[in-house]
Image: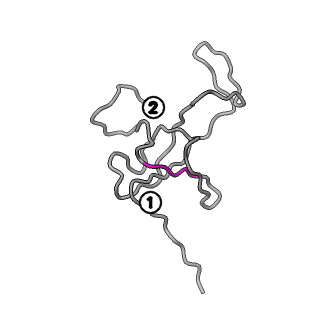
Amino acid sequence: MADVKFEIQMLHDRVMVRAEQDTEERRSTAGIVIPATVKLANRLVWGEVCGVGASARSVKVGDKVLFNPEEQYEVDVQGQIYLVMRERDLHAIATTHTDHGTGLYL
């Protein structure tokens, strides 16, 4: 009997995101090195959208999104960790096509 593969489909307004890995250290604008072990209060992170539910309105696969990783659910798919959240939990979207941009670019 052949192994059957199941494709993951997000439901409702759910979004699946692969968070960008933190580098080992960061630098402040003044050039001060901040080690990765330093916990910054309420730090938001960027991630790439890997799947969206049919009710998601503003985000699509491939967009980069800004979110709080502490308030999300983790899921392991074939050894890769993804985060699952509602679309309303996203704080910003970085995309090539926008109607209401900030003038800032990644």
Task: Give whichever of discs 2 and 1 has the lower sequence position.
Answer: 1
Residue, far front: 71
Quadrant of residue 11 within the rendered picture: bottom left
Instruction: Name the quadrant of the C terminus.
Output: top left
Q: Label 1: few (<14), some or many (≥20) within 10 Å?
A: some
Mark 2 residue type: Leu
- Tell me the residue at 30%/37% (across/down): 98
Helix, strand or loop for the magenta stretch, by majority: strand
Question: What is the distance, in whole Å, between disc 2 and disc 1 at their CAs?
Answer: 26 Å
- Tell me the residue at 42%/44% (across/down): 63
Total marks placed: 2
Color style of the picture: one colour
* Residue 99 circle label: none
Disc 1: which residue:
10
Instruction: Name the quadrant of the N terminus.
Output: bottom right
| Residue 69 against residue 78 in the figure, above or below | above
Q: Is residue 21 left or right of residue 6?
A: right
Q: Magenta residues? A: 82-86
Q: Secondary structure at mark 1?
A: loop
Q: Position of residue 85 (x, y in %)?
A: 49, 49
Q: Position of residue 26 (x, y in %)?
A: 64, 26
Disc 2: which residue:
106
Q: Position of residue 76 (x, y in %)?
A: 62, 57
Residue, far bottom: 1
